[in-house]
Amino acid sequence: MPASRRGSGAFTLPSGQVLAIHTRTQDEEDLPHATKKTMADHLRKYESLFTLTPQRMRMIVEAFKETLEIGLEKHGQIVPMIPTYVFGWPTGQETGEFLAVDLGGTNLRVCLVTLQGDGKFEVTQSKYRLTEEQKQGDGQDLFDFCASCLKTFIDSNFEEGSLQPNELLPLGFTFSYPCTQERIDQGTLIRWTKGFGAANTEGRDVAEMFRESLRKKALLMQTFQNVPVELTAIINDTTGTLIASAYVNPKTRVAVIFGTGCNAAYMERIGSIPKIKHLGLDDGAEMAINCEWGAFDSFVHEHLPRTKYDVTIDESSNKPGEQAFEKLISGRYLGEILRLVICELIDDGVLFLGQNTYKIEIPYALDTAFLSLMESDPTEELLMIIGIFTHFFALETTLAERQFFRALAKLVGRRAARLSACGIAAIVSKMGYLEDGCAVGADGSLYNKYPSFPDRVHEGLQDIFGDKGKRVLFLRTFVGSANNDEDSERQGYLHTCLNTRGSRL
Ligand code: GLC
């Protein structure tokens, strides 16, 4: 076998002209061998790589359960099982006005939520896309940006004089990264996840960093109000979703985020959290636990079925070894897994012979949203897939190739959903929720926008638990709301507010 080389490239000549080249990665005599294999043959190979049997899933569930228990027993474990200091469930009757800032994996959102009681609420919000510089720059600058956005939001949503002099609006900060907490209004960042790498932040209290940015803003700005807020709660998106889902459906027991990252929270009896026994809290009371399950199997890699594509993603990430579970599941990585398979077939001389493939060879060029578009292409000719490849990658495809891409997308998406089911099953089984059934609050772009994802998670639960798996129901949006993004975002803000309120009781 000749050594495999990338097939294409583009160079800028000193004259400014761009020269595109394509080099065959196989010697001429190898070509017939490479093309003899049909796409269906190739697909079979990937099927066996990406398919998870029910038996394998049950093994993963057992290992997961043990990991969750260890995290509750001892501090500093790989899956940290973080006590959140959010005590118990909401009643659904909470009322009031609250501000929330949500620093997620992709966007920053600022909003004002009015809780109206009876599970009803209203939201006004602004959304800002985070740049790569903000994600990788200095941490304090990132919080300065949050403070600026908040300031702009307050100025445009509160009329002059509408706040009493010295009145402080309670602010909840949804910070969706692993933080250890000693109180609800404090959180020390354990490590960045989801590709963030802002300097001078890991190991520091991010609530205090944000307060510092708010203070600076107050000194700098001389408009009608400074930044009249008091940061009263810092919470993870999963914890928030747990509380928000319970606000509308009291059967909620678990919450999962399937977005840029993947993680879960649930409510634990304090007596079952040995590592906080020294605090002398009431054993019978309950506290939400932010599992940070994305870290499951990190570093050791002994339980999860990693392919060489997963290994490549891990090794070329800014955090090799970390977030092993998340890297197989979340929206940040699924498109990249598919892209790596495609690149392998380009290298092997199977795909796009004679075409310039440089666009698809750019890391992370294939967004996870394309997977869901490919899967939901309703046309016989797979016109949507033609569009994706010609428009974004300047590549022509045959029908057989398009069918192959669609099937591949299914394999990658299905594996992600079934692995997620393993995590949910571990919590459900550990907590004994199967007999009576329970509701799982779910949110995130993957869950809301990838059409077959929810069904596949559900199917995975039935493969693990048999028919009883049907007793685990998923809640995507609020009762009476249409299933759309706006509702999902509305839910996001509601959760932060409920926790902000909780901290003030
Ligand atoms: C990552 C973060 C976690 C968050 C999840 C979903 O896993 O570490 O805190 O809940 O993404 O946003």
Image (cartoon, rainbow, N blue to C red):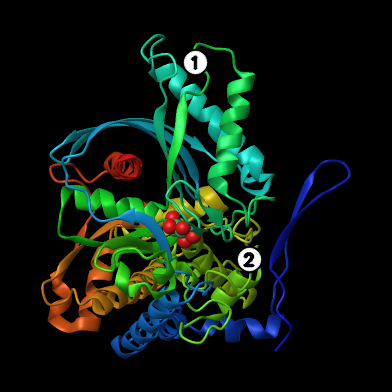
Q: Are marks 2 and 1 in contact (CB under 8 Å)?
A: no
Total number of numbered discs in the rendering: 2
Question: Quick check: 131 left or right of 426?
Answer: right
Is the C terminus in the top left, top right, bottom left or bottom right quadrant? Answer: top left
Would you say residue 331 is visible in this rendering? no
Amino acid, disc 1: Gln
- Other-residue count near label 1 (Cα within 10 Å), few / some / many at <14 / 14–19 / ≥20: some
Q: Is residue 330 above or below residue 17?
A: below
Q: Earlier in the sequence, mark 2 or mark 1?
A: 1
Determine whether the residue tagged by mark 2 lies in a helix, strand or loop: loop
Residue at the (50%, 47%) spot, across then down: 106
**Residue marked by disc 1:** 225
Question: Quick check: 301 left or right of 268?
Answer: right
Question: Quick check: 99 left or right of 200?
Answer: left
> Which residue is farthest top?
161
Determine whether the residue tagged by mark 1 lies in a helix, strand or loop: loop
> Which residue is farthest right?
14
State yes or no: Cβ of the residue under disc 2 lies below 8 Å from any atom of ligand 1.
no
Which quadrant of the figure has residue 87? bottom left
**Residue marked by disc 2:** 319
Percent coordinates x, y for residue 482 in the rendering? 19, 42
Residue at the (18%, 73%) spot, across then down: 433
Percent coordinates x, y for residue 363 in the rendering? 62, 60
Residue at the (13%, 80%) spot, across then down: 467
Question: Quick check: 34 left or right of 445?
Answer: right
- In this rendering, which labeled residue sits more in front, label 2 or label 1? 1
